């Protein structure tokens, strides 16, 4: 579970700060500019650092979600079972997987303080539709954490559909647990499990607030 949290924490740094009509950026420039913009907001907003869920969610909705391909991420995480799912099941899987990722990693916003991120330049070959951008998260007194983002060119934008922390892929990590769940209780069982997890996580901030 700690590996998953590390991966999802890294996802915080991959939200995009581009407007819908901005000129398409190179993938490494996209990641670099996003890191700067997102961390700047976090550092300046004491409410976000204190765990204000509404502000965190708003920041994620604005800067992160529009530039992740959650449909492809879900498809890769579900693996071979995806083609067996009905259209309604696919829609439910994408929604619940998206909600789970959002609720899991928004907590990482409160943990960022003095981190810096190095983004390695990447040369995109003409006609390429996929590329990996390698980055390193640096924190004083801790080992650097390599985070690799895999993006796909979709229309006039680059979208993240997988990332790996210390070589551990997010979609591969979930594919194993999702496969076990489907084998035990079917696709509907996985949807139910994700829904229940999301409902449980949704109650956590309220309980935390009430205890203050």
Image (spheres, rainbow, N blue to C red):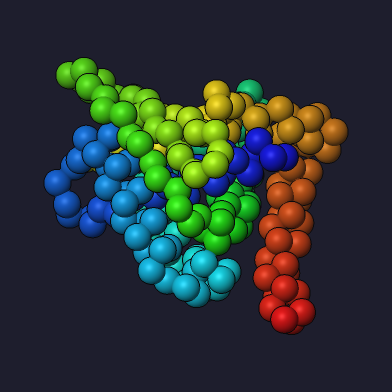
In the displayed structure image, the side of residue 177 where residue 86 appears, left or right: left
- The residue nearer to you, when weighing 94 against 9, is 9
Residue depicted at 48% across the width and 30% down the height: 146
Q: Position of residue 143 (x, y in %)?
A: 54, 33
Q: Quadrant of the C terminus?
A: bottom right
Of residues 120 and 142, the one drawn nearer to the viewer in this rendering: 142
Q: Residue at x 35, y 29 (%)?
A: 133
Asked whether, in this view, residue 61 is left or right of residue 89, the answer is left
Q: Is residue 45 visible?
A: yes
Seen from the viewer's position, the closer of residues 40 and 197 is 40
105 relative to 178 in the view: left or right:
left
Question: With respect to residue 122, does 24 lie above or below?
Answer: below
Given the current orientation, which residue lies at the most extreme left position?
Answer: 23
Residue 65 in the image: state x and y as whole percent.
43, 53
Residue depicted at x 39% and y 50%: 15
Q: Position of residue 171 (x, y in %)?
A: 58, 31
Q: Is residue 199 visible in this depiction of the protein?
A: no
State which quarter of the image contains the N terminus: top right
**Residue 3, image x and y in percent?**
65, 36
Measuring 35% from the left and 60% from the top, which residue is drawn there? 40
**How many numbered marks appear?**
0
For this rendering, which residue is in front, 56 or 40? Answer: 40
């Amino acid at each position: 579970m700690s590996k998953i949290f590390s991966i999802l924490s890294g996802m915080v740094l991959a939200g995009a700060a581009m407007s819908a009509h901005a000129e398409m950026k190179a993938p490494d420039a996209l990641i670099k500019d996003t890191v700067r913009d997102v961390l700047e907001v976090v550092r300046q907003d004491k409410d976000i650092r204190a765990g204000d869920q509404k502000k965190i969610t708003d920041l994620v909705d604005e800067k992160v979600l529009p530039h992740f391909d959650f449909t492809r991420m879900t498809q890769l995480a579900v693996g071979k079972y995806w083609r067996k799912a009905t259209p309604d099941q696919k829609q439910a899987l994408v929604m619940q997987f998206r909600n789970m990722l959002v609720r899991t990693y928004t907590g990482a916003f409160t943990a960022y303080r003095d981190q810096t991120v190095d983004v390695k330049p990447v040369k995109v070959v003409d006609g390429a539709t996929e590329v990996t951008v390698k980055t390193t998260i640096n924190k004083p007194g801790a080992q650097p954490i390599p985070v690799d983002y895999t993006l796909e060119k979709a229309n006039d934008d680059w979208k993240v559909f997988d990332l790996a922390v210390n070589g551990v892929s997010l979609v591969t990590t979930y594919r194993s647990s999702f496969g076990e769940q489907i084998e035990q209780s079917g696709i509907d069982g996985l949807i139910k499990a994700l829904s229940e997890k999301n409902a449980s996580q949704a109650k956590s901030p309220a309980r935390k607030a009430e205890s203050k």
